[in-house]
Amino acid sequence: GDSVTQKQGQVTLSEDDFLFINCTYSTTTYPTLFWYVQYPGQGPQLLLKVTTANNKGISRGFEATYDKGTTSFHLQKASVQESDSAVYFCALVGYMGYKLTFGTGTSLLVDP
Amino acid sequence: DMKVTQMPRYLIKRMGENVLLECGQDMSHETMYWYRQDPGLGLQLIYISYDVDSNSEGDIPKGYRVSRKKREHFSLILDSAKTNQTSVYFCASRDRGHAETLYFGSGTRLTVL
């Protein structure tokens, strides 16, 4: 079945630092890949998605590239702010599928 | 504005009691989901509903059942709740017109004592 791996459970940065959150995936289909963000007390919300291999998704200063060769979809941001503190989930859905499979999440804490 | 509403936000039950978690959406989305979230485990899929009375088990359906009699409402039922069902439960609906984007509610924090 499909799986998503996020090895970083927690990341702590200072404002204006560079953010890199690792995500790798495994699937037998042609997936759509997502990053969801969850703020305290809320449900996850879509941050960005990419449907086509080798394409990049960009939203609110965050970006992620769907790399089929390395089966990776790492999330990056050049300069984080305190307001970016949240939990970030990598996820995938298989081609024409309904089931969204999530990684275990990476908690980002940005110190002011 | 697309909205998924979950009730209640917080619930405390004793082991063996029945639990009903309710979810509503105002977007006429066909597909809805129930997930649970536990520390270190991320979001785990309990059930998918493709439309009224068309439900399918997810990855961890044991101990749960669902009901969808109207497209706007999707209920999660725990018959005889167990302490290991203490968790945060999220309902979501899927926007087919927005490339499979899921919209989540704010969650129900269930504690089973």
Image (tube, helix red, strand yellow):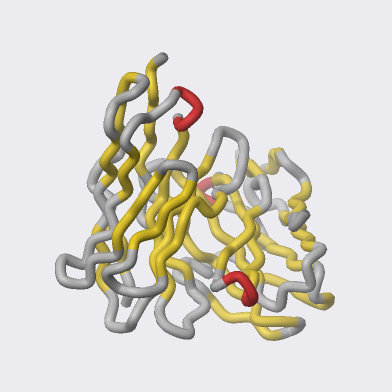
Seen in the picture, residue B108 relative to A83 is either above or below; the reply is below
Residue B20 at least partly seen: no
Q: Is residue A99 left or right of residue B10?
A: left
What residue lies at 38% left-to-right and 36% top-to-bottom?
A107
Question: Which residue reaches farthest top?
Answer: A112
State which quadrant residue A72 falls in. Answer: bottom left
State which quadrant residue B56 falls in. Answer: bottom right
Nearer the observer, A72 or B86: A72
Seen in the picture, residue A5 relative to B75 is either above or below; the reply is above
Seen in the picture, residue A97 relative to B102 is either above or below; the reply is below
State which quadrant residue A4 falls in. Answer: bottom left
Nearer the observer, A104 or A61: A61
Nearer the observer, B21 or B12: B21
Q: x, y percentage for residue A14?
A: 32, 19
Nearer the observer, B16 or B105: B105
User: If the image is split into quadrants, where does the N terminus of chain A sit?
Assistant: bottom left
What residue lies at 77% left-to-right and 45% top-to-bottom?
B8
Q: x, y percentage for residue A71?
A: 21, 67
What residue lies at 80% left-to-right and 67% top-to-bottom?
B73
Residue B80 at least partly seen: yes
Q: Is residue B5 left or right of residue B81?
A: right
Q: Is residue B85 left or right of residue A81?
A: right
What residue lies at 58% left-to-right and 46% top-to-bottom?
B88
Q: x, y percentage for residue B25?
A: 78, 62
Q: x, y percentage for residue B102?
A: 59, 63
User: If the image is split into quadrants, where does the C terminus of chain A sit?
Assistant: top left
Question: Which residue reaches farthest left?
Answer: A70
User: How many circles with numbers are drawn on the protein?
Assistant: 0
Seen in the picture, residue A41 relative to A7 is either above or below; the reply is above
